[in-house]
C-alpha cells in the first residue's frame, strides 16, 4: 500500500503588474508589485494559523523572481530566515510560448483559430512557439510530488497548482484547467482532498 502523501501548503506567488493587466506571464520573470508583497505577508499569517510548527516544514519554491520574493516575505512574516529554502526548476510556470506578454483579448484578436482550439481543450493544447500544455506540465510536476517526504510549503504558480490538484486530488482535467488559483491564500492539500484558507 502506498504511504499517504505529506500535506502540501501551496501558495501562489503574489500579484505582479502583469497579473493586474491580465497578461500571460508564463516563464517571463516579472517581479511582485506592492499588492503582491502584501499578499505574501497575508499568506504567511494564514500559514502560521494552519501549521503551528512552521519551523518543521520543508520550504520549496519555483526559481522565478515573483515566487522567490513571495517565499522570502512569507518566511520573514513567520519569523524564519528569509533565504533558507530550496528552489526546484520543475516548479516553474508552464510557458505560453509566443503568447507570453499578451492578454487573452490580444491572443483572440491575433490568432482567433488557435485561441479557439485552446478554449476547446485547455488541458492538452500547447500554444505556438514552444508553449506547454497542462498535460505536459503534469509530466514535469509528478516526480516532484512523488519525491516529497515531509509536510511542505510550496510557492509556485497558478498552472502548477492546477497540475497539483489533478495529480494529488484527482480533479478532472476540464475543471482543473479552469479553477481560480487565489493569491494571498493557502491551498492546503491533504491526501486526496484540498481546501482554501
Image: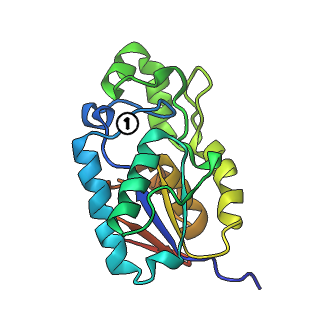
Residue found at the far front of this picture = 81
Q: Is residue 72 above or below residue 133?
A: below
**Helix, strand or loop under label 1:** loop
User: In this rendering, is residue 15 above or below 166?
Assistant: above
**How many circles with numbers are drawn on the protein?**
1
Task: Kindly identify the residue that appears in the image at 42 percent across and 59 percent down.
Answer: 11
On the question of residue 153 being in view, the answer is yes
Relative vertical location of residue 47 with respect to residue 35 in this rendering, above or below: below
Q: Is residue 129 above or below residue 29?
A: above
Q: As rendered, which of 50 and 52 lies closer to the eye?
A: 52
Is residue 28 toward the left or the right of residue 128 in the image? left
Residue 24 in picture, x, y percent from top left: 40, 31
Residue 60, percent across and down?
Answer: 56, 59
- Residue 135 in the image: state x and y as whole percent: 62, 46
Question: Which residue sits at x=58%, y=67%?
Answer: 168
What residue is pinned by disc 1?
31
**Residue 197: percent from left, percent from top:** 32, 71
Amino acid at each position: 500500500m502506498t504511504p499517504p502523501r505529506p500535506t502540501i501548503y501551496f501558495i501562489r506567488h503574489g500579484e505582479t503588474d502583469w497579473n493586474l493587466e491580465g497578461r500571460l506571464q508564463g516563464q517571463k520573470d516579472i517581479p511582485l508589485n506592492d499588492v503582491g508583497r502584501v499578499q505574501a505577508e497575508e499568506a504567511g499569517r494564514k500559514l502560521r494559523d494552519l501549521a503551528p510548527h512552521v519551523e518543521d516544514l520543508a520550504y520549496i519554491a519555483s526559481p522565478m523572481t515573483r515566487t522567490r520574493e513571495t517565499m522570502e516575505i512569507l518566511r520573514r512574516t513567520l519569523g524564519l530566515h528569509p533565504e533558507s529554502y530550496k528552489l526546484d526548476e520543475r516548479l516553474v510556470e508552464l510557458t505560453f510560448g509566443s503568447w507570453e506578454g499578451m492578454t487573452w483579448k490580444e491572443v483572440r484578436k491575433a490568432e482567433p483559430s488557435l485561441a479557439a482550439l485552446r478554449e476547446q481543450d485547455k488541458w492538452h493544447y500547447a500554444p505556438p512557439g514552444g508553449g506547454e500544455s497542462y498535460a505536459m506540465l503534469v509530466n514535469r510536476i509528478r516526480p516532484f510530488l512523488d519525491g516529497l517526504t515531509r509536510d511542505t510549503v510550496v510557492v509556485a504558480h497558478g498552472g502548477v497548482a492546477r497540475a497539483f490538484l489533478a495529480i494529488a486530488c484527482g480533479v478532472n482535467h476540464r475543471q482543473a484547467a479552469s479553477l481560480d488559483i487565489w493569491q494571498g491564500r493557502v491551498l492546503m492539500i491533504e491526501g486526496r482532498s484540498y481546501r482554501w484558507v
